[in-house]
Image (spheres, helix red, strand yellow):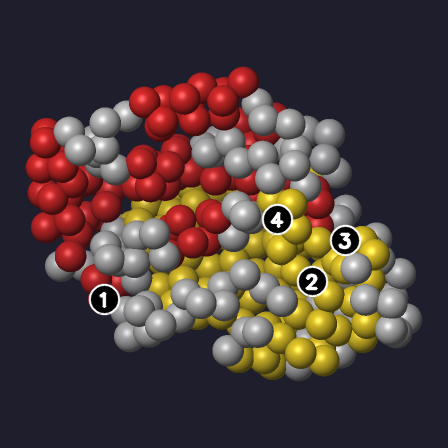
Amino acid sequence: MKTLLKISLLVALATMMTGCLQMHMDTELKKDGSGTMEMTMSLSQVVSDVLAEGAGDDDLEDIGKIMQMSEKELKEKVKGHDIKIKKFSTDKIDGKESIHVVMEFKDLEGMSYAMSQIQGSGESEGGMAIMDLGNGQYALRPYSYNWPVTEEAEEEVIEEESMDDMDPEKMQKQMEMMGKLMGAMGELEFSMKITVPGDIITSNAPVVEGRTSIWTINSSNMMTAGGDMEPDIVFSSKGLKMKAIKE
């Protein structure tokens, strides 16, 4: 299942062998299920140069689309899904191309849809949702919403399916790209934080601080940290009234 974490895994796991990027996602849920999400992503000069040359790699090209997105474009993409873009900026920080987005959402379905649009690859399925476990507990877990696939997304799928992955010229270009990127391995840094409004009972995050679950990938743990990147957080529903799906 392709979830909103596709964007996280896209830039952190699918490119873990390249490093050269930093990404931080911080999501905070309120008692009614609304909340805020803050995302910052930056690329080293090495990746920026490779993208400028023409990456020859679908994952890196998707990252390039994210970095080129404008605030106006993002607002248009999330229109009608109860999303407010509070901050949006693109800049160079310490010589790295960066994008910073802060948005408010009414519920996790809207936030999940927004993230699927940010990733720019036409995902139609997934994200996260609140499950009502029926025992005084909620769970935040991956969920398939099955939104309609856009015409643009269908065209991208057709293009991907018709691509000859074994084309020698493309393979040579990707090998050259990997050679340029391997030297910046140590720059890889990805972190994701999710804060829930009730006391946490269980979480698959490696680090839990109060009501916040934290996942981190860097050059030292990137070969072992990818197993539990899709959140599974069970927390108390006491005093909460959230839009939830019956388990």
User: Image height check: is 149 above or below 113?
Assistant: above
User: Image height check: is 117 above or below 221?
Assistant: above
Q: Are marks 2 and 4 in contact (CB under 8 Å)?
A: no
Q: Gap in Å between the C-alphas at discs 3 and 1?
A: 36 Å
The residue under the point 10% across, 29% down is 169
Check disc 3 and give the amino acid type.
Ser
Indicate which disc residue 127 carries. Answer: 4
Disc on the earlier residue, 2 or 3: 3
Residue 94 appears anywhere in the view: no
Of 230 and 88, which appears nearest the observer? 230
Residue 226 point in image, percent of width and height:
41, 65
For label 3, count other residues whose C-alpha is less than 10 Å away and answer few (under 14), some (14-19) or many (20+): some
- Of circles 1 and 4, which is in front? 4
- Of circles 2 and 1, which is in front? 2
Q: Say whether residue 40 is left or right of residue 3.
A: left
Q: Secondary structure at mark 3?
A: loop
Of 217 and 147, which appears nearest the observer? 147
Please name the residue that numbered disc 1 is placed on: 186
Q: Secondary structure at mark 1?
A: helix
Check disc 2 and give the amino acid type.
Leu
Check disc 1 and give the amino acid type.
Gly
Please name the residue that numbered disc 3 is placed on: 34
Q: Say whether residue 178 is left or right of residue 198.
A: left
